[in-house]
Amino acid sequence: MSTNNATVNILPPQRGDEETFVVQNHRCPDCNGRGYLITTEKGETVHKGCLRCDSTGRLRAKVFIEWQPDCD
């Protein structure tokens, strides 16, 4: 099984205390990238749209970083 890994180097920006970025194109683990779930109802196979990925088969991660002083 292949995996999609992303490495993020985190460095403070020159200006600003907040930043957001998106990492895209991860396969949905609930539907295995198909976009639907396979269930059995009344002896018949039924395909239901995946709620987690909105039937796209893909997910993205939105990462929010808030920079603060490093003091305890």
Image (cartoon, rainbow, N blue to C red):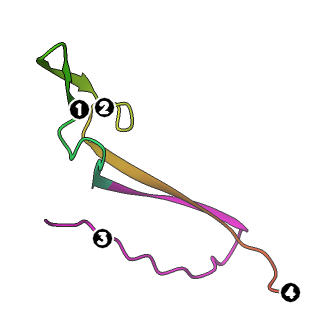
Give 61 or 1, whichever is nearer the viewer.
Answer: 1
Check disc 4 and report the residue beneath it. Answer: 71
Q: Nearer the viewer, mark 2 or mark 4?
A: 2
Q: Main secondary structure of the magenta part?
A: loop
Give 59 or 38, whichever is nearer the viewer.
Answer: 38
Check disc 2 and report the residue beneath it. Answer: 50
Disc 1 from disc 4: Cα separation = 48 Å
User: In the rendered image, which quarter contains the C terminus?
Assistant: bottom right
Q: Residue at x 29, y 47 (%)?
A: 28
Q: Is residue 15 left or right of residue 6?
A: right
Check disc 1 and report the residue beneath it. Answer: 37
Q: Residue furthest top?
A: 42
Disc 2 from disc 4: Cα separation = 44 Å
Regarding mark 2 in the picture, which secondary structure is present there? Answer: loop
Disc 3 from disc 1: Cα separation = 24 Å
| Residue stretch in magenta | 1-24
Mark 4 Cα-neighbour bin, 10 Å: few <14, some 14–19, many ≥20? few
Q: Is residue 65 left or right of residue 2?
A: right
Check disc 3 and report the residue beneath it. Answer: 5
Mark 2 Cα-neighbour bin, 10 Å: few <14, some 14–19, many ≥20? many
Amino acid type of disc 3?
A: Asn
Amino acid type of disc 2?
A: Cys
Q: Nearer the viewer, mark 2 or mark 1?
A: 1
Instruction: Provide residue 68's location: percent of width, then percent of height.
Output: 78, 75
Q: Nearer the viewer, mark 1 or mark 4?
A: 1
